[in-house]
Structure formats: C-alpha cells, structure tokens
Amino acid sequence: MNQRELPPGIDEPVFAEPWQAEAFALTVALHEKGLFSWGEWAEALSAEVKRQDASDDGHDYYEHWLAALEKLLVSKGVAPTAEVDALAAAWERAAHATPHGKPILLENDPQR
C-alpha cells in the first residue's frame, strides 16, 4: 500500500485559541438553523478579510470571522448593534481580568 505524504503543518492545531473554534462552531450552527446561507456568509467574511486594516499574513483571520458573524447577527435582526457591542466589550474586559492560563469566563468581567 502506498502512503501519500501529508502536507506540511498537518499536525498543527486548526485553531490557535479556543474562542476561534467556538466562533467557527457557532457560525456552522447558525447556518444549519437557517439564519444565513453559505453565500451570505462568504460575502460577509470576504468583506471583512478584504478590509484595508486586515493583516497580510492572516494572523487576524478569526477576528475578521467574528466581525463578520457579529454583522450578520445585526443585519438579520438577531441582536441589535448595541447589544453585540456591549457583549463584545464585556468579553474583552473579562479577558483582561482573567489570570494567564485560566479560562476566560464572562463572569470575570469586573463590570458584571
């Protein structure tokens, strides 16, 4: 039996951070629930990764992924912009308040 050589980096993790995997899974779940089509998703994500402030090396890809998802949630009327922004700010504060190596939990937001 001939074994094909695997591409370089195949053993590397797909996601650099757990939140990236969660954003990916949430996007798939929302699509499966019919919130948006893959065409709509591709258009939203494409607009984000083509932004002028996007990095050339793609290290911010999942930040753009999250921004695309947030904009779709707003455009579909799932969550108003103010709610999305407030929740994003709460997660940011929780991340800064969480000790290194510990899971980031929304309860860690000092303003909650």
Image (cartoon, rainbow, N blue to C red):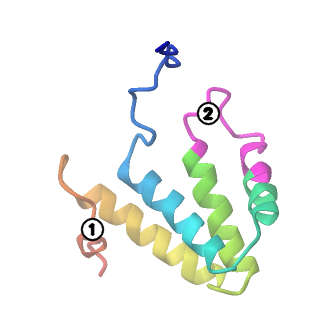
Find residue 109 and report its image quarter: bottom left
Q: Residue at x 55, y 83 (%)?
A: 83
Between 26 and 98, the residue placed more toward the observer is: 26
Q: Amino acid at mark 2?
A: Gly
* Boundaries of the magenta span: 46-61
In which image quadrant can residue 38 be found?
bottom right
Indicate the position of residue 93 as horizontal and vertical percent values.
Answer: 35, 64
Cα separation, mark 2 vs mark 1, equals: 26 Å
The residue positioned 60% from the left and 81% from the top of the image is 82
Question: Looking at the image, is 47 positioned above or below residue 31?
Answer: above
- Residue sitting nearer the eye, 45 or 83: 45
State which tag comes first along the sequence, 2 or 1. 2
Residue that badge 2 annotates: 58
Q: Measuring 27% from the left and 61% from the top, which residue is drawn there?
A: 104
For label 1, count other residues whose C-alpha is less than 10 Å away and answer few (under 14), some (14-19) or many (20+).
Answer: few
Instruction: Please tell me whether residue 49 belongs to the stretch shown in magenta.
Output: yes
- Amino acid type of the residue that numbered disc 1 sits on in the rendered structure: Leu
Residue 52 image offset from top left, x and y in percent: 77, 40
Q: Which mark is residue 47?
A: none
